[in-house]
Image (tube, helix red, strand yellow):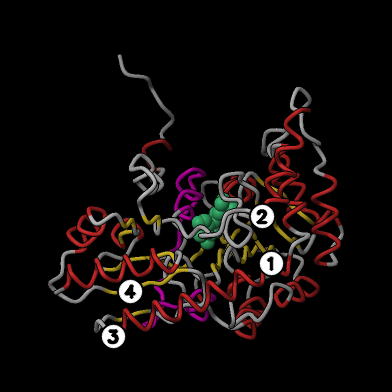
Amino acid sequence: MPLEFAERIRRIPVYPVASGYDLGTDVAMLASNESCFAPLPAVAEAAQRVLTGTHRYPDPGYAPLRRALADRYGIAPGRIALGNGSCDILLAAGEALLEPGAEVVYSWPAFSVYPHLAAASGARAIEVPLDAEDRHDLDAMATEVTAATRLVLVCNPNNPTSTAVGLDRVAAFLDAVPAHVCVVLDEAYCEYSLILGDPYASVELLRRHPNLVLLRTFSKVYGLAALRVGYGLCGSEDFRVAVDQVRQPFFLNAAAQAAAVEALRHQDEVERRVTQTLAARISLEGQLRNLGLWVAESDANFVWLHLPDGVEEADVVKGLAEGGVLVRAGASLGRPGALRITVGSEAENDRFVAALSDLLA
Ligand SMILES: Cc1ncc(COP(=O)(O)O)c(C=O)c1O
């Protein structure tokens, strides 16, 4: 007899994980929007140092990391939610806020985990199409907020399309959303964003909007994807208390906590890496446009392109993989006929452009 699972197991979409982890080292991993830079030696050492004490559970209050983030952003430690990756906070938000009869509003395509929230809770997902330039249409989203809405997700810059909207528009949108509706502004890539200017810019919005959560991660610009650390800067303590209530204790391991605290001490190097990544992205975008492709206006560490009519996305993705380049297929992200490519090292980007150009020729 097969096991009998909860009904929601049939509804929850399977996350489109990247393949290729078993392909060895000579593969350009451009499928998951990670940083191509390894963590700084001091950060890796901080993680290693705590390993001798791992017979004890990690600090359940996550005090040093909470304090470091509180100091950096000028927010009370009690308004900082932490998570085993920012995905953990997203899923906990779904659990804490959603239930049958409730609605969650987000743009589509956006981050692949968003549909999971409605499927897991039995809430209704309201997916609002992006505009013609593959950007969030915040006016259209505002009109979808109803008495049933509990949660709105805005991904800025948006994954997978790489586009961002300005903070003035986000502020106007927040003014239009009732104060009892939680708005999660998913800013996993904000450190790369020239439209936002700097990672402090949106923090100002928290003053006027207690219902706002700025969701951030150490997985991208800080190069700690494998350690899984995310955080939310919250307009009020209520959100942090609720997401802590629905999760297991000790959700953030000691090595992750130590590495994240150390990573925050090296902002100059972070900025240097951002500058290098943006320069590489601009060059990559230029080369792709020279191939005649439509490329979105990226404001992140990845690019999003539409393949020409008649070109099979699956063939291109397969051909690239055979050439040692892994990218993410649009079909798995809600937009068939597109590709999402992470900015890698110069050699990886060159390999990708050469392989794509061969396949399109
Ligand atoms: C928009 C967005 N939000 C959140 C995440 C989750 O990041 P993590 O759970 O690694 O912090 C990602 C990861 O790709 C993302 O693209």
Q: Could you give the CA–CA distance between mark 3 and mark 1, rounded to whole angstroms?
A: 32 Å
Kindly check if marks 3 and 1 are in contact, taking CB atoms under 8 A apart as contact. Answer: no
Residue type, numbered disc 4: Leu
Q: In the rendering, which numbered label is found on residue 290?
A: 3
Amino acid, disc 3: Asn
Mark 2, other Cα within 10 Å: few <14 / some 14–19 / many ≥20? some
Magenta-highlighted residues:
113-142
**Of the two numbered discs 4 and 2 in the rendering, the one whose residue sits closer to the viewer:** 2
Instruction: Quickly name the residue at label 1.
Output: 269
Residue 175 counted in the magenta span: no
| Gap in angstroms between the C-alphas marked 4 and 2 | 32 Å
Q: Amino acid at mark 2?
A: Leu
For the residues bearing labels 2 and 1, Cβ distance under 8 angstroms: yes
* First of labels 2, 1 by sequence position: 2
Q: Nearer the viewer, residue 302 or 356?
A: 356
**Secondary structure category for the residue under label 4:** strand
Residue 119 locus on image (x, y percent): 45, 46
Position of residue 261 measured from the top left corner of the image (x, y, whole percent):
77, 51
Mark 2 vs 3: CB contact within 8 A: no
